């Protein structure tokens, strides 16, 4: 019995000891677990970026914070005080990597005060989506004035003017993206755009100034070109405005080569027309208008005249020029010439202003062989020539003359004493017994004219 009691007391002591050990182990395990838990979990009252992270691991906190960042507003503040926002889910906004939360965890364990933290790491995001969201945001801003390049226009007068550039208030998307990217990488959700430069015009007024001045200096030229009849052709902005053109890129230029060439072509025709008539002071009756034959009219040397005009373009002062001529009829201020009046049947020879011959004549038979009017010069001259041709009845004739002076094909001045009496010259002989078109002269008058006429002396034929 005593042995049995002793065994019971031993077992009881062992059980008590075991229980105590188990309790101690359990208490140790509990407190050890608490210690481990507190080392890996944020303490109660920890707030990170406005998210309650109490009793969460860093991985759990990261997930919870990233979930909140989906609806996080990234505020963009403009320089006019307006604000636009982009939500985090639009750009896949998350914490960059979550490693910084380990540092916050250690700080939170040491802190006995309110545990509110801002993450010291930045955000990660989808760059392409951020760029697209910024583009959309900028396009939706109210009252956007896009920049406009300076440009050139031609005014009503013909000169070029600069239309100034417009700077506008449009932000440069790339610069906004750079600022937003840098801010988000630093963990900022407020992006300040005040003072950020706007989109600049690509072309400014100063870029166009030199071109406009160059072209306007040409258009400002004024050339007065005087022709033989003392009329003028003017080359100024009115004539040159159509030389200005825009190329395929819209740039203004002036085609001087083609413009001057076209102008001189018209000038050449005008100069020829200007020399087509002659205001002639006829002997005894005053001024009459004569027609100059086409082959005697003025011919402008177009190549030389083009170079002459180009050399004066851009001049600040008005210039007076005369064209460069290949041929010109010197029919102004005449002092030496032969004058033939069919109506009065008379011929005069003037040399250096003195009248050397004043003689009656017989011209072509009126209505059949009229002597053509106009202004001519000798084509040749010869002594003792035989003139051959056919009469109206078809018979041939051969007439000997001492002085032969043709000026229009087979028509010319010559003596006719061999078949005409002196009394036949002048009067009305030409009406019923005129020549075949030549101007018949008394021999003495023909001799004087022959001895004094040259190949430059005008022969002026008219019917008063």
Image: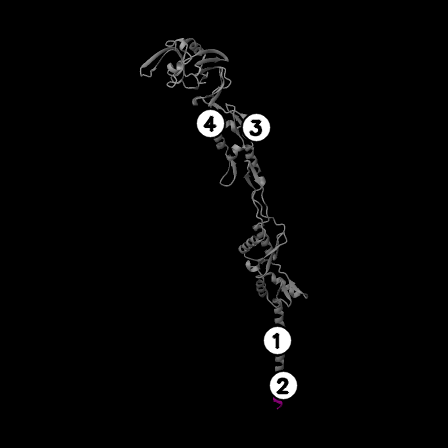
Q: Are marks 1 and 3 in contact (CB under 8 Å)?
A: no
Nearer-N-terminus badge (1/3): 1
**Residue indicated by mark 4:** 269
Tell me, for residue 9, which label it has, or none: 2
**Residue indicated by mark 3:** 318
Q: Nearer the viewer, mark 4 or mark 1?
A: 4
- C-alpha distance separating marks 3 and 2: 142 Å
Residue stretch in magenta? 1-9
Between residue 302 and residue 65, name the one nearer to us. 302
Between residue 151 and residue 352, name the one nearer to us. 352
At label 2, counting other C-alpha atoms closer than 10 Å, the crowd grade (few under 14, some 14-19, many 20 or more) is few
Tell me, for residue 26, which label it has, or none: 1
- C-alpha distance separating marks 3 and 4: 23 Å
At label 3, counting other C-alpha atoms closer than 10 Å, the crowd grade (few under 14, some 14-19, many 20 or more) is some
Residue 360 percent location from the top left of the image? 43, 12
Question: Quarter of the image containing the N terminus?
Answer: bottom right
- C-alpha distance separating marks 1 and 3: 116 Å
């Amino acid at each position: 019995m005593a042995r049995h009691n002793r065994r019971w007391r031993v077992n009881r002591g062992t059980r008590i000891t075991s229980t105590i050990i188990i309790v101690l182990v359990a208490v140790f395990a509990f407190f050890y677990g608490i210690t481990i838990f507190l080392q890996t979990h944020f303490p109660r009252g920890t707030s990170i970026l406005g998210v309650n992270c109490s009793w969460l691991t860093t991985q759990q906190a990261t997930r919870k914070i990233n979930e909140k960042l989906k609806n996080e507003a990234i505020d963009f503040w403009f320089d006019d005080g307006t604000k636009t926002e982009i939500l985090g889910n639009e750009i896949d906004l998350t914490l960059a990597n979550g490693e910084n939360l380990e540092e916050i965890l250690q700080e939170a364990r040491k802190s006995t005060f309110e545990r509110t933290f801002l993450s010291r790491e930045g955000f990660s995001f989808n760059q392409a989506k951020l760029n697209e969201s910024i583009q959309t945001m900028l396009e939706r801003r109210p009252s956007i004035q896009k920049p406009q390049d300076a440009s050139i226009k031609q005014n009503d007068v013909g000169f070029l003017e600069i239309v100034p550039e417009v700077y506008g208030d449009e932000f440069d998307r790339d610069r906004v993206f750079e600022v937003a990217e840098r801010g988000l990488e630093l963990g900022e959700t407020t992006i300040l755009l005040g003072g950020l430069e706007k989109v600049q015009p690509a072309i400014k007024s100063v870029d166009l100034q030199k071109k406009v001045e160059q072209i306007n200096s040409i258009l400002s030229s004024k050339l007065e070109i005087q022709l033989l009849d003392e009329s003028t052709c003017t080359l100024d902005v009115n004539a040159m405005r159509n030389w200005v053109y825009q190329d395929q890129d819209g740039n203004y230029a002036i085609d001087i080569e083609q413009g001057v060439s076209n102008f001189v072509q018209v000038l050449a025709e005008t100069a020829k027309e200007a020399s087509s008539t002659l205001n002639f002071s006829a002997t005894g009756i005053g001024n009459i208008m004569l027609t100059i034959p086409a082959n005697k009219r003025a011919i402008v040397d177009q190549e030389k005249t083009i170079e002459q005009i180009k050399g004066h373009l851009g001049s600040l002062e008005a210039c007076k020029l005369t064209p460069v001529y290949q041929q010109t009829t010197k029919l102004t201020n005449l002092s030496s010439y032969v004058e033939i009046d069919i109506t009065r049947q008379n011929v005069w020879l003037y040399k250096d202003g003195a009248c050397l011959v004043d003689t009656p004549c017989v011209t072509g038979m009126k209505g059949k062989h009229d002597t053509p009017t106009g202004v001519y010069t000798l084509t040749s001259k010869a002594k003792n020539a035989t003139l051959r041709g056919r009469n109206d009845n078809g018979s041939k004739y051969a007439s000997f003359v001492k002085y032969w002076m043709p000026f229009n094909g087979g028509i010319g001045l010559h003596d006719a004493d061999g078949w005409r009496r002196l009394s036949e010259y002048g009067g009305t002989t030409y009406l019923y017994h005129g020549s075949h078109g030549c101007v018949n002269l008394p021999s003495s008058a023909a001799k004087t004219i022959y001895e004094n006429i040259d190949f430059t002396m005008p022969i002026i034929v008219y019917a008063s």
